[in-house]
C-alpha cells in the first residue's frame, strides 16, 4: 500500500458530486462515485486546483492551526513574500513584522538573503551541470511532484537545491539558537504559506527527508488575527507618537520570487522560459519529451496563475497582490543598504544548499502484478477504449474515457458506469442528482 501525506481533504457531507474538481485535476487523481469525490493519494500533487474549482467548498486545504504555534518554546515565523502583498497599501512590511511579534512570534525571517543564496546556488549549478536540458526550478512543490508522478524520466532535471523557505528554516534556527543560547530542538520554524502544496512539502518533502520547517499556517488563516494586531499596534503608536523604523527587507529578488519570471529574469545571461498554470506547464513538459525544446537552459514553473500570488491560501486578488509587491520593491530600491553582496560572499558555500537526498520518481501503483497479468489488463483497457466514445463527459466518475478504460481494466470501476454502455446508468444518475 502506497501512503502519501497530503494537505487536501474532502468534506464528504458537503460534496454533491458536481464534477468540477474532476475536470481540473492535472494528474487524474480524482474520481466521483455514488455522487461523492475520492482522491487517489499517490497521484495527488496538492496543487489545490480542486479547492478553487469546487462550488460547494467541499474540498479544503489542511494547514496547521494557529494555536499550535504556542507548543514551541521559541517561535520563528518564516514569511512567504506573498504575505506582503495581501494587506492594504497603508500597511508596510515593518507593520506586518511588528504584528507577528505582538502575536507571540520571537523572531521573523523574510527569506531576503536566503533568496540570494538560492539564486547563487542555481547559477553555480547551471555552470557546472552536464546533462539533459532544460533544468527545472525546485521552487514550486506542485511542479516537483508533477514531475515525480507524470514525468519520472525528467526527475534528474529538477535543480537539486533547497528552496529559499527551507534554507531560511535552517539558517534562522541556527542563528536564533546561537544568539539566544538555546537548543535548536526547542525552536519552531513556522512557514506562513500561500498554498497547500508547501504545507505538504513540509510534512513529507519530495526527497523523503525531514524538512527544516516544523509547520505551516495558511496566509488566509493568519490574516484576520494579524490584521487585528497590526491595527492595534498602529493605533497605539499614533497615540504615543512613536514611529516605526524603515522596512528592513534587503533583497528585491525575494519579493520577485513569487511572481512569474522573477527568478529567471535575475539569471540574465541564461536562456530561460517562465511558465505559469499547470496546463501550460504540462504542454511545455510534453514538448520537452518530444524534443521540441532543446536550447533552453532553465525552466521556471509555477502551478498557480501569475505565480505564488495566485495560491489557494491567499486572501487578496492575485493581480492586486502583484501590484502591491511591485510597489514594495520600488521602495526597497530606494533604501537598499548595499551590503548584500558582502553578506552573500560571507555565507555562501558551494554545495551547501543542495538537497540532502536525491529526488526519485513517485511510485503510483504497488499492485505486485506479474507480467502476464499486466498484459491482460492492457488488453482489457484497449478493448474498452475501442468501445468508448471519447467524449470525456465525466458521468462515469472518471475524468476521461481513456482513464475510465484503465479503471475498468484495473478492476476499480464497472463498465456499467458509462451511460452509453449501460442505459440504466442514466436513471441512476437522475436519482442521484434529484432529477426525478
Image (cartoon, helix red, strand yellow):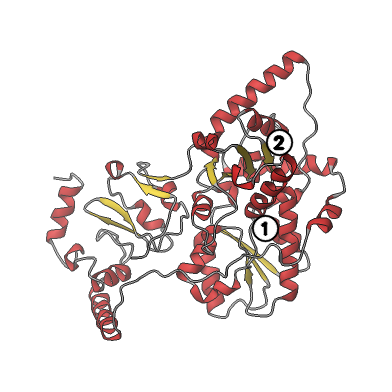
Front-lying residue, 278 or 142: 142
Q: Which of 193 and 27 is in front in this view?
A: 193
Q: Is residue 43 above or below residue 172?
A: below
**Quadrant of residue 82 within the rendered picture:** top right
Q: Position of residue 106 (x, y in %)?
A: 66, 35
Q: Say which residue label 1 marks.
A: 261
Determine whether label 1 and label 2 are within 8 Å by CB: no
Dot 2 falls on a residue whose secondary structure is: helix
* Badge 1 or badge 2: first in the primary sequence: 2
Q: In which quarter of the image is residue 292?
A: bottom right
Q: Residue 93 carries which label?
A: 2
Res 396 visible: yes
SS for dot 1: loop
| Mark in the foreground, 1 or 2 | 2
The reply, left or right, for residue 372 in relation to residue 92 is left
> Where does residue 166 sit, x and y in percent of width and height?
62, 54
Quadrant (top left, top right, bottom left, bottom right) of the N terminus: bottom left
Give the vertical position of 49 relative to 186 (above or below).
below
Q: Tell me the residue at 19%/66% (across/down).
A: 414
Position of 314 with respect to 381 (left or right) is right
Relative to 10, residue 42 above or below: below
Query: Which residue appears at 43% of the width and 54% of the height?
Result: 6
Amino acid at each position: 500500500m502506497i501512503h502519501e501525506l497530503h494537505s487536501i481533504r474532502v468534506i464528504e457531507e458537503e460534496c454533491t458530486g458536481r464534477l468540477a474538481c474532476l475536470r481540473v485535476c492535472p494528474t487524474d487523481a480524482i474520481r466521483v462515485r455514488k455522487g461523492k469525490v475520492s482522491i487517489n493519494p499517490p497521484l495527488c500533487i496538492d496543487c489545490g486546483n480542486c479547492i478553487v474549482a469546487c462550488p460547494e467548498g467541499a474540498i479544503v486545504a489542511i494547514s496547521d492551526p494557529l494555536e499550535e504555534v504556542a507548543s514551541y518554546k521559541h517561535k520563528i515565523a518564516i514569511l512567504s513574500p506573498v504575505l506582503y502583498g495581501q494587506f492594504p497599501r497603508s500597511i508596510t512590511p515593518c507593520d506586518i513584522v511588528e504584528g507577528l511579534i505582538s502575536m507571540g512570534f520571537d523572531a521573523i525571517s523574510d527569506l531576503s538573503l536566503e533568496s540570494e543564496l538560492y539564486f547563487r546556488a542555481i547559477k553555480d549549478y547551471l555552470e557546472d551541470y552536464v546533462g539533459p536540458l532544460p533544468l527545472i526550478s525546485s521552487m514550486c512543490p506542485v511542479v516537483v511532484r508533477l514531475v515525480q508522478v507524470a514525468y519520472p524520466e525528467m526527475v534528474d532535471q529538477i535543480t537539486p537545491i533547497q528552496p529559499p523557505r527551507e534554507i531560511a528554516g535552517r539558517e534562522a534556527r541556527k542563528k536564533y539558537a546561537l544568539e539566544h543560547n538555546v537548543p535548536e530542538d526547542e525552536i519552531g520554524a513556522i512557514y506562513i504559506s500561500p498554498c497547500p502544496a508547501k504545507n505538504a512539502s513540509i510534512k513529507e518533502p519530495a526527497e523523503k527527508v525531514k524538512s527544516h520547517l516544523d509547520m505551516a499556517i495558511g496566509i488566509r488563516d493568519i490574516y484576520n488575527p494579524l490584521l487585528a494586531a497590526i491595527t492595534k499596534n498602529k493605533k497605539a503608536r499614533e497615540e504615543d507618537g512613536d514611529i516605526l523604523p524603515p522596512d528592513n527587507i534587503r533583497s528585491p529578488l525575494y519579493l520577485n520570487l513569487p511572481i512569474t519570471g522573477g527568478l529567471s529574469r535575475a539569471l540574465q545571461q541564461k536562456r530561460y522560459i517562465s511558465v505559469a498554470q499547470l496546463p501550460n506547464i504540462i504542454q511545455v513538459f510534453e514538448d520537452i519529451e518530444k524534443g521540441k525544446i532543446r536550447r533552453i537552459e532553465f525552466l521556471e514553473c509555477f502551478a498557480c496563475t501569475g505565480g505564488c500570488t495566485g495560491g489557494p491560501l491567499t486572501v487578496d486578488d492575485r493581480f492586486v497582490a502583484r501590484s502591491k509587491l511591485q510597489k514594495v520593491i520600488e521602495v526597497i530600491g530606494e533604501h537598499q543598504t548595499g551590503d548584500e553582496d558582502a553578506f552573500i560572499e560571507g555565507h555562501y558555500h558551494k554545495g551547501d544548499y543542495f538537497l540532502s537526498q536525491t529526488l526519485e520518481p513517485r511510485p503510483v501503483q504497488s499492485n505486485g502484478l506479474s507480467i502476464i497479468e499486466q498484459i491482460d489488463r492492457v488488453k482489457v483497457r484497449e478493448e474498452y477504449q475501442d468501445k468508448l466514445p471519447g467524449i470525456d463527459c465525466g458521468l462515469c466518475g472518471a475524468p476521461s474515457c481513456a482513464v475510465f478504460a484503465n479503471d475498468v481494466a484495473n478492476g476499480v470501476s464497472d463498465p456499467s458506469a458509462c451511460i452509453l454502455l449501460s442505459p440504466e446508468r442514466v436513471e441512476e444518475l437522475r436519482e442521484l442528482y434529484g432529477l426525478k
